Amino acid sequence: MADENTHFSKYFSLPQFIGKSVFDSKGHDCGKIKSVLVDPQKFSISGVIVKKRLSKEYFLSRDYFEEINDSGLSLNTVPIKPGDKVADVDGKNIGKIIQINLNPDTNKLESLEIKSRFRSEIISSDRIVAVGEKIKIKSF
């Protein structure tokens, strides 16, 4: 009977994902998987909810996934996360991301809510020009 189940050893069960570390394409720690979201119509993973220490939780769609193994989930890019700094194309600081707004049907980024010292602002995703140490946006 044990031999029948050995071919399943290359798969992960959903509980095995919980608590795994998430690393961006540059190897930076993005947090830990808090939960796995499954599309009930397709019976497939839609994405994961990630939490890093004192930051807010955020969603990463499976489009970001590169590989999952015993050390964690590797991403194919650098994701946008709550708390990331935002700057204009000249590098001038604008504020920090406090909310990421996704399209509920496609899980694609629609906008970011940015908080500066005295105000908050909604930035459309089409204004994002670069993602790295800071999120760079076009000013209007």
Image (cartoon, rainbow, N blue to C red):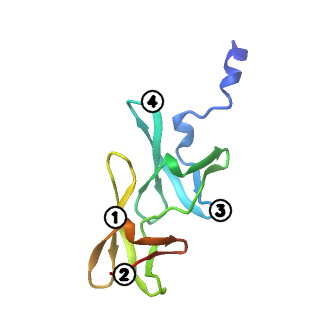
Rendered position, 10 above or below 36: above
| In-front residue for pair 122/118 | 122
Q: Secondary structure at mark 2?
A: loop
Q: CA distance from mark 1 to mark 2?
A: 14 Å
Q: Answer whether labels 2 and 3 touch (C-beta < 8 Å).
A: no
Question: From mark 4 to mark 1, how far is it between C-alphas?
Answer: 28 Å
Can you tell which mark lies on residue 139? 2
Classify mark 3: residues with Cα within 10 Å, few (<14), some (14-19) or many (20+). Answer: few
* Three-letter amino acid code of the residue under disc 3: Gly
Q: Nearer the viewer, mark 3 or mark 4?
A: 4
Q: CA distance from mark 3 to mark 1?
A: 26 Å
Q: Nearer the viewer, residue 61 or 130?
A: 130
| Quadrant position of residue 37 | top left
Q: Earlier in the sequence, mark 4 or mark 1?
A: 4
- The residue to which callout 4 is attached is 43
Checking the image for residue 111, the label placed there is 1
- Name which quarter of the figure residue 55 lies in: bottom left
User: Around disc 1, counting alpha carbons within 10 Å, would you say few (fewer than 14), some (14 to 19), or many (20 or more)?
Assistant: some
Of the numbered discs 2 and 3, the one sitting upstream in the chain is 3
The residue that mark 3 highlights is 27
Amino acid type shown at disc 4 = Phe
